[in-house]
Image (cartoon, grey):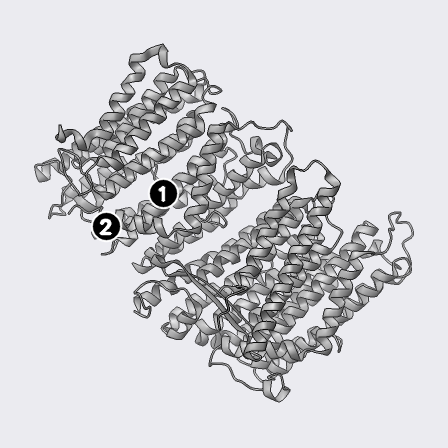
């Protein structure tokens, strides 16, 4: 279905224009009004994006039942068969919603690096715009452009306002992702040419649009293997999957809190999304073959991340490795052809995005106020900063997937869904659930309870003002999705079935009553 | 009189530039000399577009078709923008005599046009020599600086040797065919192969393809930045035009042995260029090695040439985008001063001049093939799709890995400009001329990437005219 207004481009254009607008009052002489204006402007832009997204989805859902399927397609470079093609279905919607919410939260979060001005908001809005684009694009070249572009704002913000080793960390991040995506770039071009060579395109030109490519079924087994591996490498680095996580500890240690939250919540999700959106339809045979290995990689990541997280001595590193562990569930979920597991993986990706962003922000507040990120110098904070302790408690129990939180729904669906396909790896993953509870709650205990390290002079105040609203909003979303997951699941589930193609076993979505 | 029409652009340039020699001190006022040069280049470009016959013609020694006209326009445009961009920094570089400087530059542009229009080897060789001899002198134009003279001498000595190679190749060609016209022969005997190899050595030297690139870093660094700006674009355009013309028309690519040689040249250039650039602290040397690597990419279109012209079009497309990137990058350096060279000189540039820093970042992103300045990215899409469609998988993989590797050093300059503290807070003054040139280059690298369709179509037309009818 195509609607005239608002086109899906507005989801990309509004934040991008917002970013430009942030730089507009650069020349104003009044510093104070400038700072306030930019903040309000950036907040306004990100709220507007969220509203537009909600409006689009609502209008489409009302007129078209539960299944979203909005498209916007224009010719871009006809000579090369490259189109400007965006699509919003339930799958994209879940991730776009996450992007809009996280961007709003990070922009709204008042604590930002001391030297950061308008550029901070501009880069965050640019990040929102490009990530949104990656979740909407269905033309592979367009997707690749957004996939590369979303790196730059994050890299810029990290290199401008990060820790002491920020330049090395940025360079390492850049090299990792560029090395990963280079071969994917080539594979995309190969697919486009192959469509032409097989004579499948209407105008005898290249074709890069995913539905066109997927409907052709033209790849040999060898081609699927080679191209699939190239795609998988790019996404494995982006997610990141063990052992391609070399960029992650540095990045999460050096990045400012907001950027770490943004990166952890959104960038890796593009990999999860792309495996469902692009890899399953394009390389169904390869994915069926690779499924067990992918599941194994997911299970290993869950346990590895949890074990390394247990050994960490500072809060940010613990969050970094716990992120690897939680993303392992998503990888396990997308490994098999089960609607339930895949729906669970998308839901878990959204849930993890919310929780990890909330955790990075809360922990950031603690670190800023206590002046330390190490367990040995933190402790007994529950009494001095009760509100922070309260929110951290909510997010911690959400992270360990307690019932009534969103991650419980996600992990439950993934584990049940993949039990039939990969029982052994699901068992390993279950072990990870236990380990996750151990390190998360230990960390909470050591930070909030125990002896107070009164020697630390920098004990600041509790969170207040807008930050409380941000955290309360995130907490509400996490618990809300935990109690009423059906609406979102009902959107994701059919979209996943369509996206992953006929290969998928429509096993249990009806039994669970997701499809309304 | 009509017989002279095809030669009008070249005549206008060469006769017009004589004005500098006649006028002597009269034209020594900085503003006036630059404007006169711009006027002459503009006139030449106008004559190419407006006066040259639209139908392909082959007057004495020249060939006028869409292919040669496009390259001639590109060379004039490159010269025009680089003259505008660097005119105001000439004073700082202590160029000896401004009138001589512009005389030499216009003469070299004239030689480049002769290379582009030539339809026989003798004319081509004259063009090469005119362009090169003027450039040798230009490289030494910064008379007070030792490295400038060193660059000139090095360029001259090595250039002479490469010319000798080329001349020997032409002599062999004459021996085999009994003529000098760039036209197909039905022979691939050892003499023909040797002739091809020798000519390729000569042209690879002019382009700066590895392993004949050793002069590139020294000359790019030692020559006045304004000369480097000019030469990084115009010489490449002219030499690539000559290379495409010879390879396609005389040696009838794709022939297996020639493809093998070009494949090797291309892979060697991009790998050697990128590996060497990784270790540079000097931005000029980095850009010089990067130009070696980029020339390797541009050769891909010729290597993978199948029966279609669209593959060659991708090389033309990439070359066009590259001209904007390299002119822009060197113009920024020239604005920063005659001795701005090390990465350290660019530290914190965003605090001293946001415009320069953002423009330079866009040029480097374009060179690295990253958004938002997507001229490089689109060029690579075009080039690599061509390579894949001709089943040159190995070449495509080496090229794409090279472009990932290149990000490591392309990142360094924007990182210094944007993320590091400036040594001084003194703002950089950018003249109106330079602002105009830089804005043009930024518009080109962004515009070509965002809306490439018109240029793609133009390049297809140009490439299909590369074969003599």
Left or right of B306, for residue B187? left
| Residue at mark 2 to residue at mark 1: CA–CA distance | 17 Å
Give the answer, above or below, for where B40 lies relative to A277: above
Neighbour tally class for label 1: few under 14, some 14-19, many 20 plus, Cα within 10 Å: many
Give the answer, above or below, for where A139 lies relative to B7: below
SS for callout 1:
helix
Give the answer, above or below, for where A28 lies relative to A466: above
Q: Position of residue B14 (x, y in %)?
A: 25, 23
Q: Residue at x 79, y 55 (%)?
A: A365
Q: Is residue B276 visible?
A: yes
Q: Is residue A165 visible?
A: no
Which residue is disc 2 drawn over? B464
Q: Position of residue A194 (x, y in %)?
A: 34, 66
Q: Position of residue B84 (x, y in %)?
A: 42, 29
Neighbour tally class for label 2: few under 14, some 14-19, many 20 plus, Cα within 10 Å: some
Which residue is disc 1 drawn over? B320
């Amino acid at each position: 279905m195509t609607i005239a207004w608002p086109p899906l481009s507005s989801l990309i254009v509004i934040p991008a224009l917002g970013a430009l607008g942030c730089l507009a009052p650069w020349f104003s002489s009044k510093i104070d009004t400038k700072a306030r204006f930019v903040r309000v402007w950036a907040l306004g832009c990100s709220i507007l994006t969220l509203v537009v997204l909600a409006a689009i989805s609502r209008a489409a859902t009302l007129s078209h039942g539960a299944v979203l399927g909005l498209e916007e397609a224009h010719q871009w470079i006809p000579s090369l068969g490259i189109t400007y093609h965006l699509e919003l279905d339930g799958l994209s919607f879940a991730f776009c919603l996450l992007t809009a919410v996280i961007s709003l939260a990070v922009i709204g979060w008042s604590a930002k690096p001391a030297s950061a001005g308008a550029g901070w908001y501009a880069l965050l809005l640019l990040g929102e715009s490009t990530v949104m684009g990656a979740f909407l694009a269905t033309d592979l070249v367009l997707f690749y452009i957004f996939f590369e572009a979303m790196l730059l704002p994050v890299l810029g913000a990290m290199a401008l306002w990060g820790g002491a080793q920020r330049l090395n960390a940025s360079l390492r991040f850049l090299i990792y992702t560029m090395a990963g995506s280079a071969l994917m770039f080539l594979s995309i071009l190969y697919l486009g040419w192959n469509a032409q060579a097989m004579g499948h395109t209407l105008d005898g030109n290249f074709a890069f649009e995913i539905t066109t490519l997927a409907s052709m079924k033209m790849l040999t087994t060898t081609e699927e293997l080679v191209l699939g591996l190239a795609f998988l490498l790019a996404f494995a680095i982006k997610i990141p999957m063990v052992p391609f996580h070399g960029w992650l500890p540095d990045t999460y240690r050096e990045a400012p809190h907001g950027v770490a939250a943004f990166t952890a919540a959104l960038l890796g999700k593009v990999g999860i999304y792309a495996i469902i959106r692009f890899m399953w339809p394009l390389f169904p045979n390869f994915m069926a073959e690779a499924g067990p290995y992918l599941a194994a990689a997911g299970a290993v990541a869950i346990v590895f991340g949890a074990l390394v997280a247990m050994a960490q001595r500072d809060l940010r590193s613990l969050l970094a490795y716990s992120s690897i562990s939680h993303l392992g569930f998503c990888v396990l979920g997308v490994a098999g052809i089960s609607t339930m597991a895949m729906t669970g993986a998308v839901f878990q990706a959204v849930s993890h995005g919310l929780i990890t962003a909330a955790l990075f922000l809360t922990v950031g507040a603690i670190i800023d106020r206590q002046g330390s990120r190490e367990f040995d110098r933190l402790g007994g904070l529950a009494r001095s900063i009760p509100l922070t302790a309260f929110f951290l408690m909510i997010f911690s129990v959400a992270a360990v997937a307690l019932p009534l939180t969103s991650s419980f729904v996600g992990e439950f669906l993934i584990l049940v869904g993949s039990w039939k396909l990969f029982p052994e790896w699901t068992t390993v993953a279950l072990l990870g659930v236990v380990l996750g509870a151990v390190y998360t709650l230990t960390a909470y205990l050591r930070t909030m309870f125990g002896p107070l390290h009164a020697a630390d002079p920098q004990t600041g105040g509790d969170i207040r003002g807008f930050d409380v609203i941000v955290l309360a909003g995130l907490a509400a979303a996490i618990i809300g999705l935990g109690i009423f997951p059906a609406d979102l699941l009902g959107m994701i589930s059919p979209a996943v079935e369509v996206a992953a193609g006929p290969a998928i076993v429509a096993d249990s979505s009806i039994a669970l009553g997701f499809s309304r | 009189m009509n017989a002279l029409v095809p030669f009008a652009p070249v005549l206008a340039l060469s006769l017009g530039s004589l004005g500098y020699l006649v006028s002597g001190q009269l034209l020594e006022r900085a503003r006036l000399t630059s404007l006169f040069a711009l006027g002459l280049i503009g006139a030449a470009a106008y004559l190419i577009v407006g006066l040259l016959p639209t139908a392909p013609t082959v007057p004495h020694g020249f060939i006028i078709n869409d292919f040669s006209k496009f390259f001639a326009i590109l060379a004039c445009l490159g010269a025009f923008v680089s003259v505008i961009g660097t005119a105001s920094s000439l004073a700082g570089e202590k160029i000896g005599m401004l009138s001589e400087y512009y005389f030499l530059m216009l003469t070299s542009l004239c030689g480049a046009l002769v290379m582009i229009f030539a339809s026989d080897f003798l004319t081509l060789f004259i063009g090469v020599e005119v362009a090169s001899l003027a450039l040798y002198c230009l490289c030494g134009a910064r008379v007070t600086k030792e490295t400038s003279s060193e660059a000139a001498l090095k360029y001259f000595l090595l250039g002479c040797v490469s010319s000798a190679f080329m001349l020997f190749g032409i002599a062999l060609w004459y021996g085999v065919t009994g003529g000098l016209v760039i036209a197909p022969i039905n022979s691939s005997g050892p003499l023909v192969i040797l002739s091809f190899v020798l000519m390729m050595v000569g042209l690879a030297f002019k382009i700066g393809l590895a392993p004949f690139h050793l002069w590139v870093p020294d000359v790019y660094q030692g020559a006045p930045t304004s000369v480097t700006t000019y030469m990084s674009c115009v010489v490449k355009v002219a030499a690539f035009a000559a290379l495409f013309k010879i390879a396609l028309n005389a040696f009838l690519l794709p022939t297996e042995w020639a493809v093998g040689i070009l494949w090797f040249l291309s892979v060697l250039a991009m790998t050697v260029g990128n590996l060497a650039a990784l270790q540079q602290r000097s931005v000029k040397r980095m850009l010089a090695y990067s130009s070696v690597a980029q020339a390797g990419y541009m050769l891909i279109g010729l290597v993978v040439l199948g029966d279609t012209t669209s593959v060659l079009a991708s090389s033309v497309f990439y070359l066009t985008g590259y001209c904007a990137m390299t002119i822009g990058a060197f113009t920024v350096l020239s604005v920063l001063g005659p001795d701005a060279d090390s990465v350290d000189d660019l530290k914190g540039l965003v605090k001293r001049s946001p415009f320069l820093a953002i423009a330079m970042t866009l040029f480097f992103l374009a060179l690295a093939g990253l958004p938002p300045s997507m001229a490089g990215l689109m060029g690579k899409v075009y080039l690599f799709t061509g390579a894949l469609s001709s089943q040159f998988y190995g070449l495509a993989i080496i090229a794409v890995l090279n472009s990932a590797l290149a990000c490591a050093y392309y990142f360094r300059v924007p990182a210094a400009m944007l993320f590091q503290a400036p040594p001084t807070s003194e703002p950089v003054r950018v003249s109106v001329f330079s602002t105009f040139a830089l804005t043009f280059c930024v518009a080109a690298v962004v515009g070509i990437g965002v809306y490439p369709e018109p240029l793609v179509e133009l390049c297809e037309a140009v490439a299909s005219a590369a074969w003599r009818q």
